[in-house]
Image (cartoon, rainbow, N blue to C red):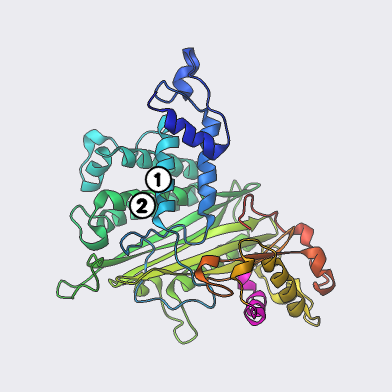
Amino acid sequence: MPELPRCHLIQQLAGSRCAAPKTGAMANRSTISNAFICDKSTAENALSLAKNSFRVVGWLGRQENGFSSTVGGNSIVPKKSRLIHLVNLSMRSLHILLLIFVLSPFAAAQSFDCKLAKSPREHAVCSDEKLKVLDSAISAAYKSLRAQLSPDSAALVQSDQREWLQWLDVVCPAHGRGIADDMNRCLENEYANRERDLRQVVHIGSTVIFLRSHFLFKTGSSNEERLADNDPGFGYGSLRWPQIDIQPSRLNSAYTEWNSAVKKKAAELAVGIDPEDKNATFEAAVDASGTIDSFYTVEGANDRFIDVSLIDSGYGWGAAHPLTGQTSFLWWLDRNRELTISDVFNPHSDWQDRLTALAISNLRAQPDLKDMLGDDIEKAVKETVSDPVSWTPNRDGLTVTFGQYAIGPYAAGMPEAHINWSDLKPYLAPDLQPTTLPDPTPNRPR
């Protein structure tokens, strides 16, 4: 029974039991090579579990021999205290393997007919089983996303997808060098990225929060000396941001305002904009010296409030690792503006001291973290908890995320401290109504 290991892998990941092969009409629906089978829900649970693990900041990074698909221009300056390494290649490999193991029996049709393949990328997909599965997964995700959107928004996604395909042909060339010396490896990673992107959809009643994206490629001069062994002779960038769509009505002013504000903020963070350079653009920031990547996670949303984590990462060719920063973008839909400190805390109270003490207590109570924290972290903790860019507020309480190295060594990761609203009640703003905030994101890492 050669397929038994596959079923056992799914069983272990999903916590479900593999059954004996079925016969008759049901056999064609759920059997895996006529050996042991797992039903579709089990397979989907396993894939969901794997995808949830990628909510670690920096999921999009891929590192192999100093290579990262997350992008950069020159060496990127860390943003405030939020600097992290991207996840290692083993996590990326797990995601790709799960797509192969889990989706193969239920894969949708490929995005094109292999009999009509023309480009090097299309020929590569048709000759590689892993790429075939990934291509089918992207095709299914793309069709599913467009079906959930209004005609205007679906047309925007179609334009983004076409731009991505053109970008893919140049960042994963047939005969590249440096980090682009293996076309299939490059395609595997970029296909996995795109599949994850297209499935990042949030529904709030008739409202849909969906992904927009923009991709850039900058070639270097033929006369330029290579910066490092992994320098492919070009640089590239990818910018992602969320947008709201609604059917069948038109967007109201609050949604239109948020769409504009979050797009602007995502672009600013990707560029690393500062007060001295208000005219900086993503197009100008991406150059041949590395990569810049910007993506996001919707932490919580309802018809009153949206919380989005905007993550940007840069890698310069030859650097030891990418640098990544994260910022919370917190927006009141009913007030048509960004959240301020006074929306949450009474400015005349000692809320900073109280929040600092609670955060330290919560951090030191975490078994995997307590031995990594220094004795004197109060100043660093207070600096982080005092800035809303580190906050994730929801109905249950306030989570504060600390940047890499902010309060401990690299091994500490990006620690989080969760504080219940009841412990902050005397310090809260009178108008704050925590029960009207979004529910916490399911399976959010703590």
To which quarter of the image does residue 255 belong?
bottom right
Which amino acid type corresponds to the residue marked 2 in the rendered image? Asn
In the rendered image, which residue does mark 2 sit on?
189
Percent of width and height locating residue 239:
43, 63
Labels 2 and 1 touching (C-beta < 8 A): yes
Residue 273 pos. (x, y %):
46, 78
Q: Which residues are magenta?
A: 375-390
Is the C terminus in the top left, top right, bottom left or bottom right quadrant? bottom right
Let me know if residue 389 is in the magenta part. yes
Q: Quadrant of the N terminus?
A: top left
The residue drawn where x is 22% and y is 55% is 173
- Name of the residue lying farthest toward the bottom: 276
Can you tell which mark lies on residue 96?
A: 1
Q: Does residue 314 appear left or right of residue 367 in this picture?
A: left
Instruction: Indicate the position of residue 139 as horizontal and vertical percent values.
Output: 40, 41
Tell me if residue 218 can be seen. Answer: no
Q: Main secondary structure of the magenta part?
A: helix
Tell me which residue sits at (48%, 73%) in the image: 268
**Secondary element at image label 2:** helix
**Helix or strand or loop: what does disc 1 sit on?**
helix
Rendered location of residue 151, percent (x, y)? 49, 47
